[in-house]
Image: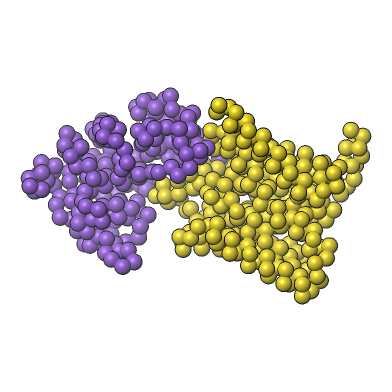
Chain colours: A yellow, B purple
Amino acid sequence: MNEIMSILSYTFFQRALLCGIAISFSAALIGVILTLKNYSMIGHGLGEVGFAAIALALALNLPTYAVSIPIVIIAAIAIMIISQKKGEGADLIIALVASGALALGVIITAFTSGFGTDAYNYMFGSILTIGSADVILSIALTVISVGTYAFFYNRLFLVTFDESYAKARGIRVTLYQFLIALITALVVVIGMRMMGTLLISSLIIFPAIIAKRHTNSFKGMVFTSVFVSIACFIIGMFSAYFLNLPTGAGIVLIYMILSALSLATTKLLKL
Amino acid sequence: MSLLEIKKLNVSYSNHYALEDIDLKIDEGEYVCLVGENGSGKSTLVKTIVGLKKQDSGTINLNIELGKVSYLAQFNLKDLNFPATAKEIIMTGTQKHGKLPFYSKKDKEVYKRVIEQLHIEDLQNRRIGDLSGGQKQRVLIARALISEPELLILDEPTAGLDYNITQEFYKILKQLNKENKLTIIMATHDIEELANDKPRIVYLSKKVVYDGNYDGWKGYEK
């Protein structure tokens, strides 16, 4: 207990905790829609795009957010538009974008700074890199996500559940898809520092999948997902600190354990 | 003035015309069935009326507010575990389905009346994927009715449903047309099942081939 109180007194840990809770909140909200719309892998694809964008920013000595946020937003919108218009599966488009972006990121890194600490931290996440700008951005992101959910809850649900009916009712489906793409891109870019490009998608997918298994309603899934996301983040972050693991990996480990327990519980209840 | 007036409507897909020179007038309180073979254009016409398909030329004049038009299509739930209760789905049909997850007193009153009319009070908190085909269809009618529409447009709503459920569904439609004075336009294959309801029949084969009453259609068909 004393050890927990002691690490809570460190500024870097407080920043990481606040930033992580805010990102987990937003990731859980957007994860519900993405999972139900079969866009589960978009976080993974955008993570790779984010890595390429950050490699470019580091190579050009530019601020990482200023470069990565617009690039990832454009990629998110493009993935959604292309996968709908071409009739291709979203997973196929995401796989193509992800591998292409990762290759580009690695090439840029190889030609410039090499695979140094910065690149490693973005790949696997590190709470030590989280600064006050990240905290402010993550809180702003939470305000945007909660605001979007609060004001457009029913339309977001309708667009997720039955897009044709939403269109027939005169709802501008594209506008809501744009909002979903925007929030997803922001979650990915801001969450990358903590989780790493390779693991950021787990923050989006796991809470939604666990929540879906235990709820009958959309509202229930949203609340359960947020609760699971924040709880797993806090437990994962402390575990990672005490076990000396990369933060992202520690959080994913907790998700894996909870997923296994959740699956076992549902199977047992069906017996 | 007609409720819906279609003039010289032409609609095509990439390589062929689906509808050619359609002229159609539908008055308030009518029960109209759009029938025809597969590929005759009946679903395309419905989709064009509700704005899901763009026309190449021609006009569609709806002489009521867009909010007073409701739509019900064949709906296949791909994910049976989709977390949505019947109540959540019905409420998406409300007029003010835009903001905040709260509903007005009027929305709640209409909801109560609609679920009572359709006898689905006991389904409201059940997950949509757990309902039978007939129950799902009642939930979707409730969603279409909660906005208190004056015009209900249906696109093959009974496809995939068995005979008894189809009969029950048409009974509800007839009741809504008679008691609620609801104007109905429905694309369907089930002409025989509608023998008792005697709707106006519009037979399509890319063009309007027949437009008249049910008994006249039976004579024309022979």
Q: Is residue A82 left or right of residue A203?
A: left
Q: Position of residue B47 (x, y in %)?
A: 33, 53
- What quarter of the picture does the N terminus of chain A occupy? top right
The quadrant holding residue A67 is bottom right
Q: Residue at x 63, y 64 (%)?
A: A99
Please state which of residues B25 and A218 is positioned toward the viewer in this rendering.
A218
Residue B174 in the image, given as x and y percentages of width and height: 24, 34
Quarter of the image with the C terminus of chain A in it: top right
Residue at the limit of the structure toward the front, as seen here: A271
Q: How many numbered dots are placed on residues in this image?
A: 0
**Viewer-closest of B208 and B135:** B135
Residue A20 vs residue B163, the one in the foreground: B163
Residue B159 can be seen in this image: yes
Vertical comparison of A74 with B159: above or below: below
Q: Is residue A120 left or right of residue B44?
A: right
Residue A23, given in percent of the width and then of the height, sits at: 71, 48
Name above or below for residue B167 compared with residue A56: above
Q: Can residue B91 be seen here?
A: no
The residue at the point 21 percent across, 51 percent down is: B36
Residue at 76% x, 49% y is A249
